[in-house]
């Protein structure tokens, strides 16, 4: 591996840094964006039960807020449980926007790496071409074989590394985007259901 890095020249270090960042983000988002962590399956039922039992207080709301992203959204509803429907819904929507921003964290960086990696590989290819042309002597003939081989190595390795980094980064970026969108839709549906339950109980 070290021999490949040496053969690829200095531009490969930019790609290696990008690959480490991309891998770190993929692992972090894979651990964080788990459905059971974002949308605990029985949480809404528990919140509704607590509400019907009249046990809503500051400690319950604070505990719910720390539970999960869905808990944070429902906690904002519980804080305004005695307010009119519009006020309660607005507070939930505001909490939902903050939660959505948290779920989307680092995805822009991963998408940027997916877009930028092929360009970084292309940059390495250009550097390799410059090395190849630099291996020509003053008359334009009799290229130095060592410099020629080195220039070709830089060109090909950087192109390959750039594509190898971009493809999985793009796949995971699109996967995480779709996952976050599905979480947000599910969260909105559960929040609306909670608002309906609260206000139907008042009537």
Image (cartoon, rainbow, N blue to C red):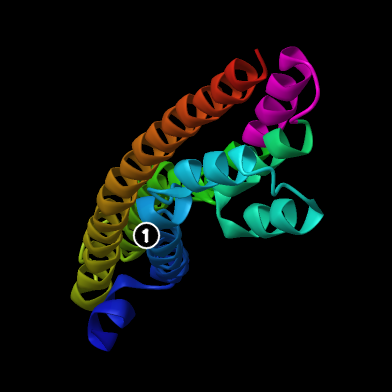
Can residue 101 be seen here? no
Q: Quadrant of residue 156?
A: bottom left
Rendered residue at 38%/60% (across/down): 26
Return the x and y of residue 45 as percentages of the image width and height. Answer: 46, 42
Q: Position of residue 100 (x, y in %)?
A: 58, 38
Where disc 1 sits, the SS reads helix
- Relative to residue 188, is residue 83 drawn left or right? right
In the image, 13 versus 124, the foreground residue is 13
Any magenta on residue 83? yes
- Residue 26 within the segment the image draws in magenta: no
Q: Nearer the viewer, residue 74 or 129?
A: 74
Give the x, y percent position of residue 61.
Answer: 72, 51
Dividing the picture into quadrants, the one containing residue 52 is top right
Residue linked to disc 1: 30
Crowding at mark 1 (Cα within 10 Å: few <14, some 14-19, many 20+): few
Of the pair 142 and 192, the residue shown nearer to us = 192
Q: Quadrant of residue 137?
A: bottom left
In the visual, does 38 lie left or right of 173? right
| Magenta-tinted stretch | 81-97
Answer yes or no: is residue 129 visible.
yes
Q: State the quadrant of the N terminus.
A: bottom left
Q: Quadrant of the C terminus?
A: top right
Q: Give the residue drawn at x 42%, y 53%.
A: 33
Is 72 placed left or right of 142 in the picture? right
């Amino acid at each position: 591996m070290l021999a490949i890095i040496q053969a690829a020249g200095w531009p490969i270090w930019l790609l290696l840094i990008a690959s480490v960042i991309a891998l770190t983000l993929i692992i972090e988002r894979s651990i964080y964006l788990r459905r059971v962590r974002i949308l605990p399956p029985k949480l809404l039922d528990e919140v509704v039960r607590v509400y019907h039992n009249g046990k809503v207080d500051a400690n319950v709301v604070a505990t719910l807020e720390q539970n999960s992203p869905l808990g944070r959204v429902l906690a904002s509803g519980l804080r305004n449980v005695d307010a009119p429907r519009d006020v309660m819904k607005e507070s939930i929507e505001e909490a939902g926007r903050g939660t959505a921003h948290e779920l989307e964290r680092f995805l822009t960086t991963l998408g940027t790496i997916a877009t930028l990696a092929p360009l970084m590989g292309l940059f390495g290819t250009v550097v390799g071409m410059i090395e190849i042309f630099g291996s020509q002597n003053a008359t334009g003939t009799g290229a130095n074989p060592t410099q020629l081989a080195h220039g070709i190595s830089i060109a090909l390795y950087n192109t390959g590394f750039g594509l190898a980094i971009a493809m999985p980064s793009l796949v995971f970026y699109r996967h995480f985007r779709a996952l976050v969108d599905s979480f947000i839709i599910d969260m909105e549906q559960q929040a609306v259901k909670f608002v309906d339950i609260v206000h139907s109980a008042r009537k």
